[in-house]
Structures are given as C-alpha cells and as structure tokens.
Image (tube, grey):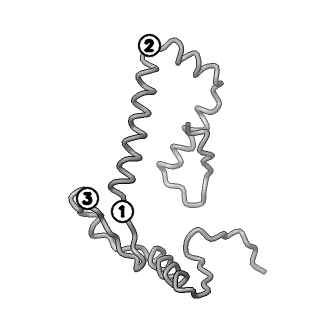
Amino acid sequence: ILSKLGLKSTPINTKGFESLLKLVETTCKDSFDLYQGLYKHNLHSKQQLKLLRTAFDEIERDLTTKGIEVRGNGEFKVPSQTDVNPNVMRMKPSATIQIHALATALKEKGEEVISLAVGEPNDTKCP
C-alpha cells in the first residue's frame, strides 16, 4: 500500500514522515513473493486484510462526516465542536490559509489573482 502512494522526501519532513519513508524503503525491498507466501501460510491474513479494509472505511467515514471546513475568510467551521479537541478550537488560522482564502474569494469575484500562497509551483528559477 505504501509503495503505491509514491511518497517522496521534502524539505519540511517531520520525524514521523522520515520514519514512514524508512518503512516504505525497507518494506519495498522485499519481494512480492514474500508477501504472497505470508498471506498463503498465515492463518490470520484474511482477517487482517478485513480489519485493514474496515479501518480505511472508518477513516473515510470520519473524514467525510466530521471534516473541518475552512470558510472563505479563513475561519474554521466545525460540524460538532464536541468531537474536536479544545486545543484545536483555540488555534488561529495560519497566515497561509488566510491569504489563500482571500485569493480564492477574490478569484470568485472575478478578480485576476496570482496567488503564491498554497500549492503553487516553486521550481521556477530566479534570474
């Protein structure tokens, strides 16, 4: 599963992400035959796959039903505040999110905007 994600190192890796990259590197060196053999000879493999599918379904359900929406002004809209840690509720939106929200709102009004806040390529060479 992890190899299919195409994870790559970035300049802002967290320690947890670095650990994940090492795990991907280590497990991807094993042959698929090894995993087929483990699946075939492990009595619990079908149950483990079923639990994995269930976990993915639960994560997808939680993401779609309990998602936090960022409004155009950069404020958070939380469907049910009882489901969110109070520390998260005290967080202020990042400046990047606020700038992105402003740029999006201006674009929706028909303004021509070049936003370099979120998701813009940064591989352009400066003269």
Q: Are marks 3 and 2 in contact (CB under 8 Å)?
A: no
Query: Which residue in the structure is indicated by mark 3?
Result: 85
Query: Which residue shows up at 60% across the image and 20% down it?
Result: 34
Q: Would you call the spot at circle 1 few (<14 residues within 10 Å), some (14-19), or many (20 or more)?
A: some
> Identity of the amino acid at label 2?
Leu
Rendered position, 70 above or below 113: above
In the structure shown, which secondary structural element does the residue marked by tag 3 occupy?
loop
Which residue matches tag 2? 43
Q: Amino acid at mark 1?
A: Ile
Q: Where is residue 50, by image quadrant?
A: top left
Q: Residue at x 51, y 44 (%)?
A: 19
Which image quadrant for residue 92?
bottom left
Give whichever of discs 3 and 1 has the lower sequence position.
Answer: 1
* Lower position in the chain sequence, tag 2 or tag 1: 2
The mark found on residue 120 in the picture is: none
Question: Outermost residue, bottom direction?
Answer: 111
Q: Nearer the viewer, residue 80 or 34?
A: 80
Q: Amino acid at mark 3?
A: Asn
Given residues 53 and 27, the one toward you in this image is 53
Badge 1 element: loop
Q: Residues within 10 Å of mark 2 (few under 14, many from 20)?
A: few
Give how far apart the Cα atoms at labels 3 and 2 are.
Answer: 39 Å
Q: Which residue is mark 1?
A: 68
